[in-house]
Image: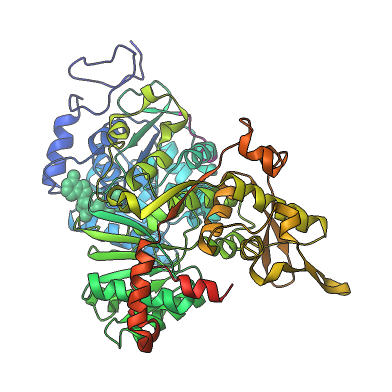
Amino acid sequence: DDLSAPTKSKGKGKATGGTDYATDDFVWSPELKSKLRSVFKIQNFRLCQEGACNANVDGRDIVCVMPTGGGKSLTYQLPALLSPGVTLVISPLLALITDQVLHLAEAGIAAVKLTGGTSKAESRDIHNRLLAMATGRLGNEKEIKLCYVTPEKIAKSKSFLSMLQKVVNGGKLSRIVIDEAHCVSQLGHDFRPDYQKLYVLRQTFPRVPIMALSATCPPQVLQDLLKTLGMKPVSDGANATVGSTVYFSSPLYRPNLHYQVLPKPASAQAAIVAMKDYIMEHHPRDGGIIYCLTRKDAERVAEGIMKESGGKIKTGVYHAERRDEEKEKLHLQWRRGDVKVVCATIAFGLGIDKGDVRFVLHHSLPKSVDGYYQESGRAGRDGKDSDCLLFFRPADFSHIAAMMASERGGAAKLHAMLDFAQDLRECRKIAFAKYFSHSSQLSMSSWTTAEKNALAPCNHCDNCTRLPDSFTQRDVTLEAWQILRVVDAVKATGGQLTLAMLADLARGAGGGNYEVGGGRRGKEKMDLNLQAVCGGKVALKKEEVETLIVHMLVQRYLVEKYHQTAYNTVVYLGSGPLAVSLTRFSRDRLAIDAHAPKIECCFRAATRKRKSRSEKEGSKSSGKRKRQAGSSDEEEEESDA
Ligand code: ADP
Ligand code: MG
């Protein structure tokens, strides 16, 4: 028999020869169950916890992807009690580590932490205890079971690594756990350079099994992570092949989260009012988070919401540049409820331990779908109904793309996010499931049951509940062709267009004027004859043209062209690899030629607008105050054209 096959008390091996870890018939199963109850005071395993524990005790390399709050910690803490020696846990944040070590101490488990904040004396004591374990001088009952460190320890501390080598030599390092493992990959949304240095672990200790934990691990991130950490390709936890990394994932879908993407009003002020109105109407007394793109935005939104609500909504600001005392104070005020809404950049994240976050609003488009899943997922960790709203405006694309200009794979990530935001039809649950499915690149037959179950629509997101007349799907092939002709015509004169400029120019706003040049020769005003270039104005509303342009970017009819100035990055648009498939047609042939590509786009219907316009009519004196979340500002858009 295969030596590496796990010891099962009853033979229930699969015909394919893989091991099914998701069972309770391993020789250690009774002990696992009893420790679960006696030590952790938990009655039953959740999701894929039992399988992950089994593969763990069996000494396998493991990747385990479970949603935030799903219970990933248990999948290494419980097996640590059944294994000889110490389990090393690498975790990105001091706050997370402190929290875990406290919980473990309460449960009577010997857990320690070695971080920047650990005192010299304490650190020496821990080193000594670990060395004593390595040489067998410490009785089994005195062993440290879990040792938490920040990644810097691995990346920067030679003395720690050499001490670890001694523990390994003594056969006392049972496993290495990497929490928040997506931080390893630059393709993820939370890359940390120190995490990338974790490759030394497999290099230095090739025989010590590794477990990687994450809440968000789309296929490319998973591949990157495996490669960086020196782990073998994955096989499913229900049919794990010899020598592979055992992969577990539980449904990412959290039924208590209600997702919606809403059109974001054009002016900054109106966007703030829309958010204020939403909070006042749906969550007047609840705690929530508003994620903003920049530090400035966070400050502006916090101030605006406080003011617009007449002080009723108490807001706070969180971003990386705030001082530690300020951050700590805010955390405290928020937990106590003195601050209701935290307006933050994505720096506010890991380590939020507040369960009753009732809403997460996004003031601007997140940079990636993983980021969005993670950030919005901070709502409703207590399992109660919570709202996740994304305020989206295609024109926001330019700022975000500029910020991501230097990120590896940044454009592709942003495109997936744009696609999600512009989609008015697909269930959000399915959209997430498709994005995150590790098997999406494999055949359907290798999908896990959890992944198959994930394909039933949720029936409560915006797209599942959308009325059929709230949007139209139209053939906009001609309009797309016109846009490409405008791009080419402007390029021929040496001009460059941003998304906003292109949208205006194509619609004939501003009489077809645009500028060329700059630099030493100064700017030159140009005039575009739309009639001659593409047979006239693009007959779409401003918001619609922007939607179409974004769609064309995602589909590669257009591409980003990054222009670096002394102060910032400007994102211009150029024709993309697919453009020729359209531009080789003349306007007339486009309509009749069967070989012409057909471009369709979904636009939100105008019904709501008409209603809100009459509302506005009746309340002109109160200005913009009456506008509701979800209404779009047609008038305002026209006026800034
Ligand atoms: P994650 O790291 O996946 O975000 P944690 O490991 O921090 O989640 O667990 C979240 C919470 O769920 C913790 O309070 C933990 O005690 C609890 N928990 C974990 N497993 C179970 C279970 N099987 N039954 C009940 N509660 C559980
Ligand atoms: Mg965790």
The residue closer to the viewer here, 350 or 512, is 512
Q: Examine the structure image and report whether residue 73 is included in the region drawn in magenta.
A: no
User: Where is 502 relative to 232, above or below?
Assistant: below
The residue closer to the viewer here, 18 or 619, is 619
| x then y, percent, for residue 538 | 61, 57
Q: Is 78 left, or right, of 621 in this rendering?
A: left
Question: Magenta region's main secondary structure?
Answer: loop
Q: Quadrant of the C terminus?
A: bottom right
| x then y, percent, for residue 6 | 29, 22
Q: How many marks?
A: 0
- Looking at the image, the residue that sits furthest to the right is 521
For image coordinates 68% across by 45% down, the residue present is 576
For image coordinates 34% across by 44% down, the residue present is 87
The residue closer to the viewer here, 481 or 277, is 481
Question: Can residue 128 be seen here?
Answer: no
Quarter where residue 18 is shown? top left
| x then y, percent, for residue 494 | 82, 60
The residue closer to the viewer here, 199 or 357, is 357
For the record, the magenta segment spans 228-233
| x then y, percent, for residue 33 | 14, 36
Tell me which colouring the rendered structure shows: rainbow
For image coordinates 40% across by 57% down, the residue present is 605
For image coordinates 42% across by 50% down, the residue present is 472
Q: Is 79 left, or right, of 593 in this rendering?
A: left
Question: Can residue 426 be seen here?
Answer: yes
